[in-house]
Amino acid sequence: MLIRPYTPADRQPCIEIFKSNMPNFFAPHELGDFENWLTAKDNTQIAYKSNESEYYYVVELDKQIVGCGGFYIPKSNAEARMAWGMVENRFHKKGIGRAFLEYRINQIRLINPEISIALDTTQHSFPFFEKIGFKVTKIQKDTYAPGLDRYDMVQVT
């Protein structure tokens, strides 16, 4: 398994990974938001104007991109937030997601060892994050789409 920075050549495989996770993990209408994120990365720009910095990576397995994800740090530097993390559906439950999340956490710790780490996810994947040390802080019903709830989580150290 190789984890490396995202490049514009990775765009289409990342979109296919996103689509493989619809509708259980991402609502179809979120695809446009994800494509906007990738467009910013393609142009070495910040996607969210309130951010100080943004980082995005891909996971390769046998030279095939099977995951993508990153994080950003808002200008407030109050916390780092995971962004658009996913593994192709057929590669779920193989340890790739866990290794990739741990990689991103380590990258954040290299930048700022003291910063808190937060994320939002759905009811379908919050147990994955709980196993890795994240705690639910808030639940909002039907936030992403009908039947797709938002779970806000923070890493417990």
Image (cartoon, rainbow, N blue to C red):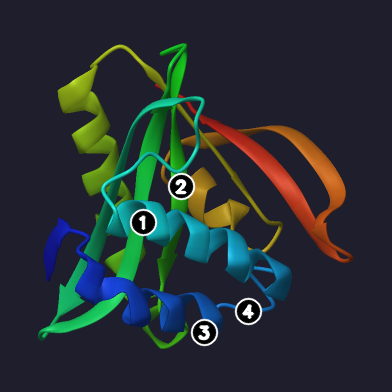
For badge 1, the amino acid type reads Gly
Residue 117 lies, in percent from the top left, at 43, 28
Note whether 121 is above or below 91 in the view shown.
above
| SS under mark 4 | loop
Which residue, given by chain and number where applicable, does mark 2 sit on?
83
Residue 87 lies, in percent from the top left, at 39, 71
Q: Residue at x 10, y 84 (%)?
A: 63
Q: Tell me whether the residue at label 2 lies in contact with that at label 1, contact meaning CB atoms closer than 8 angstroms.
A: yes
Q: Tell me whether the residue at label 4 lies in contact with that at label 3, contact meaning CB atoms closer than 8 angstroms.
A: yes
Which residue, given by chain and number where applicable, does mark 1 sit on?
69
| SS under mark 3 | helix
| SS under mark 1 | strand
Q: Please identify the quarter of the rendering in which residue 113 is found.
A: top left
For label 3, count other residues whose C-alpha is less than 10 Å away and answer few (under 14), some (14-19) or many (20+): some
Which residue, given by chain and number where applicable, does mark 4 sit on?
22
Residue 65 visible here: yes
| SS under mark 2 | strand
For label 2, count other residues whose C-alpha is less than 10 Å away and answer few (under 14), some (14-19) or many (20+): many
Observer-nearest of 2 and 95: 2
Which residue, given by chain and number where applicable, does mark 3 sit on?
20
For label 1, count other residues whose C-alpha is less than 10 Å away and answer few (under 14), some (14-19) or many (20+): many
Observer-nearest of 72 and 67: 72
For badge 2, the amino acid type reads Ala
Residue 72 lies, in percent from the top left, at 39, 35
Q: Residue at x 19, y 64 (%)?
A: 7
